[in-house]
């Protein structure tokens, strides 16, 4: 489902270069938290509640263990659905399962990329990526990204290739392309376009480059 959704976001001539997500340690921490909660419920029911609860209700009390299990399932699905993608035009962040949230930064507007890695991050290959852009958002921060060095390198390489490819476009790129995208952004701001419609039409404009 996520793969097909990402495919729909791409422009006609846009290609995926690199895909990653948050490091598995993020999911492991959530699994441990839910496991501790489940263990606490077992102890609470076994040692305390069964003293006061009628025997017929004790099995029902154990049904409370469904709550941390459902929470764990939600964490796994959310972790799987969150992706960070580098294409030859932009950087995309996708999150959400049924309701999708998509954020992207055009490589043209990327001014700088900052990578923060702790010692543990260097050993286990994760880190925080901060993308400084010339857009209204200014800064996009991705936390606990897996393979952050590869992610940063792929993005900077794609930006350099994009710059070389657009060197001869001059005036056409600045006005003929930026104008329609600005109009689409205004329509989105007025609520006349959804985020998905904006991304699709923006990709169509960029595909004409």
Image (cartoon, rainbow, N blue to C red):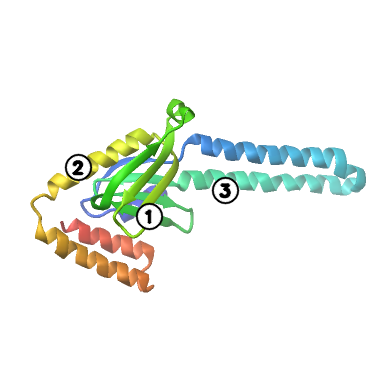
The Cα–Cα distance between marks 1 and 2, rounded to whole angstroms, is 21 Å
Q: Residues within 10 Å of mark 2 (few under 14, many from 20)?
A: few
Q: What secondary structure is marked by label 2?
A: helix
Label 1: element kind: strand
**Which quarter of the rendering shows the C terminus?**
bottom left
Give the side of residue 78 with respect to residue 178, left or right: right
Disc 1 or 2, which lies upstream in sequence?
Answer: 1
Q: Which residue is mark 1?
A: 103
Q: Nearer the viewer, residue 176 or 44?
A: 176
Would you say the residues marked 1 and 3 are in contact, meaning their CB atoms lie under 8 Å apart?
A: no
Please report the residue visible at 56 percent of the width from the left and 45 percent of the height from the top. Answer: 75
Numbered disc 3: secondary structure: helix
Q: Residue at x 86, y 49 (%)?
A: 57
Q: Mark 2 or mark 3, which is nearer the start of the sequence? A: 3
| Circle number at residue 53 | none
Which is more foreground, mark 1 or mark 2?
A: 2
- Quarter of the view holding residue 20: top left
Q: CA distance from mark 1 to mark 3?
A: 22 Å
- The residue nearer to you, when weighing 106 against 57, is 106
Where, by quadrant of the figure, is residue 184 drawn? bottom left
Q: Position of residue 159 (x, y in %)?
A: 23, 44
Judge depth for marks 1 and 3 and give the one in front. 1
Task: Check if mark 3's residue and mark 2's residue have beta carbons within 8 Å.
Answer: no
- Identify the residue at horizontal 36%, vertical 74% (top origin): 190
Mark 1 or 3 closer to N-term? 3
Q: Around disc 3, counting alpha carbons within 10 Å, would you say few (fewer than 14), some (14 to 19), or many (20 or more)?
A: few
**Label 3 vs label 2: CA separation?**
39 Å
Q: Position of residue 139 (x, y in %)?
A: 37, 51
Task: Report which residue position mark 3 lands on.
Answer: 74
Please state the horizontal and vertical placement of residue 171, each as a whole percent of the image.
10, 60
State yes or no: discs 1 and 2 in contact (Cβ < 8 Å): no
Residue of label 2: 160
């Amino acid at each position: 489902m996520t793969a097909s959704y990402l495919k729909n976001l791409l422009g006609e001539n846009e290609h995926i270069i690199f895909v990653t997500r948050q490091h598995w340690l993020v999911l492991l921490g959530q699994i441990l938290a839910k496991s501790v909660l489940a263990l606490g419920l077992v102890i609470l029911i076994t040692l305390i509640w069964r003293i006061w609860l009628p025997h017929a209700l004790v099995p029902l009390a154990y049904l409370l263990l469904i709550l941390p299990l459902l929470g764990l399932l939600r964490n796994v699905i959310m972790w799987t659905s969150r992706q960070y993608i580098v294409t030859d035009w932009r950087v995309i962040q996708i999150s959400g399962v049924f309701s999708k949230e998509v954020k992207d930064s055009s490589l043209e507007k990327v001014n700088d990329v900052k990578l923060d890695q702790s010692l543990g991050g260097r050993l286990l290959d994760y880190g925080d990526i901060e993308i400084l852009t010339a857009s209204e958002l200014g800064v996009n921060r991705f936390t606990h990204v897996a393979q952050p060095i590869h992610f940063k390198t792929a993005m900077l390489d794609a930006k350099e290739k994009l710059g070389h490819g657009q060197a001869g476009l001059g005036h056409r790129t600045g006005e003929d392309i930026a104008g329609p995208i600005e109009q689409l952004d205004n329509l989105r701001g007025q609520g006349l376009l959804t985020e998905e419609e904006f991304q699709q039409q923006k990709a169509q404009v960029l595909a004409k480059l």
